[in-house]
Image (cartoon, grey):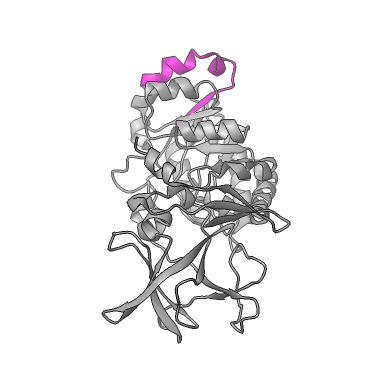
């Protein structure tokens, strides 16, 4: 079961609210990272809206968040543009060919003409700061964003914004060096009266305890003053980090070729794909009855009454080491090797921490594996199941 803590969500979005007020900017939630819309009523007042990666996310934002909708996609078709022109507040393009193709349709639309719809271009400052190639939009030959040389002598009429998104789980020092590159390559555009907004994208780890929020506030203020425009930020992970867990049950244990295995009722490839894609190693807790003598040095984001939690350690630690894996046919459906204070047995509950962002949005029904229910834990501790998945959901997905 996925469980999302409303208290933790509100804690994060309150930090984002304080940052945007201090910096004088706008902050929206990136739905690609977290789109559990039944939680929106609890965080709507803290944020300025949503950023969407295409029509369906934009519709979700418009239907259930009800504030600004910032839409960017690597490409749109005619039906996307026709629909988005009716409600999105910002529409950013990935290429000059797309903008040229749809310019007349957009600029003649009543919402564009009365100032309710603004259009921009995603730029590529060609300044890599990340460490994972699959998440680097500034890699050589990247398809994401327009480089400075492509904008030379280009017809930019009708545009009023520039948008970059180059960070991924990074601090504000990387934003600072990126802003230097943006200014060097695109500063002349940002200083022209034509451009009224700069979107600094997402990847800012604003709600992490060691994130330098003071520097972020200073950088945003400087950008607003230097260019005399509005600044937008689009954090996704920062909104939902450490707000949810995935509770799993051990369904089998056995030994093979010297390894102890535990098969769970959840899957890395189907329910936690970033474990394989990023890759990363999540914290895992063994849940025990409260009277258990197992120590509790740390707890997951969502805890239940009557339980204590033991944080699993790496295989070099003393204890019982086991390879956690999913129930699919994929040989690589492995979460990792973890050490627990005792051998796991069928029926044990494991809690995977920090599973609200970039996990729930990527889940699948590969192999017909049962999809975990989704629940929210209210601030008073009560649990509300907001979605349960059935065989019919699996059956109807492809027909």
The region drawn magenta spans: 101-120
Across and down, in percent, residue 370 comes to 42, 53
Q: In the image, is residue 106 part of the stretch drawn in magenta?
A: yes
Q: Is residue 324 above or below residue 208?
A: below
- Residue at image point 49% right, 56% down: 170
Who is closer to the viewer here, 376 or 173? Answer: 376
Across and down, in percent, residue 194 comes to 53, 25
Q: Which residue sits furthest front?
A: 391
Who is closer to the viewer here, 97 or 195? Answer: 97
Q: Which residue sits furthest right?
A: 380
- Residue at image point 36% right, 20% down: 101
Q: In the image, is residue 154 part of the stretch drawn in magenta?
A: no
Across and down, in percent, residue 184 comes to 44, 42
Q: Is residue 210 above or below residue 345?
A: above
Q: Is residue 299 visible?
A: yes
Q: Please indicate whether residue 141 sits to the left or right of residue 201 in the image.
A: left
């Amino acid at each position: 079961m996925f469980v999302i803590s409303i208290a933790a969500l509100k804690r994060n979005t309150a930090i984002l609210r304080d940052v945007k007020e201090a910096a004088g900017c706008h902050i929206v939630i990136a739905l690609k990272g977290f789109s559990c819309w039944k939680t929106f009523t609890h965080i709507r007042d803290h944020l300025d809206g949503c950023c969407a990666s295409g029509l369906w996310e934009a519709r979700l934002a418009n239907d259930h968040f009800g504030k600004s909708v910032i839409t960017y996609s690597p490409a749109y078709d005619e039906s996307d543009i026709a629909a988005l022109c009716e409600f999105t507040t910002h529409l950013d393009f990935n290429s000059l060919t797309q903008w040229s193709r749809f310019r007349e349709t957009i600029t003649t639309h009543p919402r564009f003409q009365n100032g309710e719809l603004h259009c921009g271009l995603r730029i590529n400052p060609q300044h890599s700061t990340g460490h994972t190639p699959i998440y680097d939009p500034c890699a050589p030959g990247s398809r994401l964003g327009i480089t400075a040389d492509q904008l030379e002598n280009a017809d930019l009429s009708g545009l009023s914004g520039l948008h970059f998104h180059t960070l991924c789980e990074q601090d504000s020092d990387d934003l600072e060096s990126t802003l230097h590159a943006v200014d060097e390559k695109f500063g002349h555009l940002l200083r022209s009266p034509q451009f009224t907004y700069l979107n600094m994208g997402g990847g800012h780890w604003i709600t992490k305890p060691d994130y330098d929020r003071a520097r972020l506030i200073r950088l945003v203020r400087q950008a607003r003053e230097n260019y005399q425009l509005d600044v937008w930020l689009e954090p996704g992970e920062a909104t939902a980090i450490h707000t949810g867990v995935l509770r799993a049950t051990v369904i089998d244990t056995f030994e093979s070729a010297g390894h102890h295995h535990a098969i769970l009722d959840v899957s890395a490839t189907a329910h936690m794909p970033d474990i394989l894609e990023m890759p990363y190693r999540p914290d895992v807790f063994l849940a025990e009855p409260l009277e258990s003598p197992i120590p509790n040095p740390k707890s997951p984001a969502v805890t239940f009454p009557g339980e204590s939690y033991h944080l699993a350690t790496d295989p070099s630690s003393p204890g019982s080491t086991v390879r956690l894996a999913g129930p699919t046919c994929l040989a690589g459906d492995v979460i990792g090797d973890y050490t627990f204070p005792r051998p796991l047995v069928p029926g044990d509950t494991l809690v995977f921490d920090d599973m609200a962002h970039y996990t729930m949005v990527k889940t699948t029904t590969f192999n017909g594996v049962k999809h975990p229910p989704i629940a929210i834990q209210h601030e008073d501790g009560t649990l509300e199941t907001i979605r349960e998945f059935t065989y019919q959901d699996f059956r109807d997905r492809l027909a």
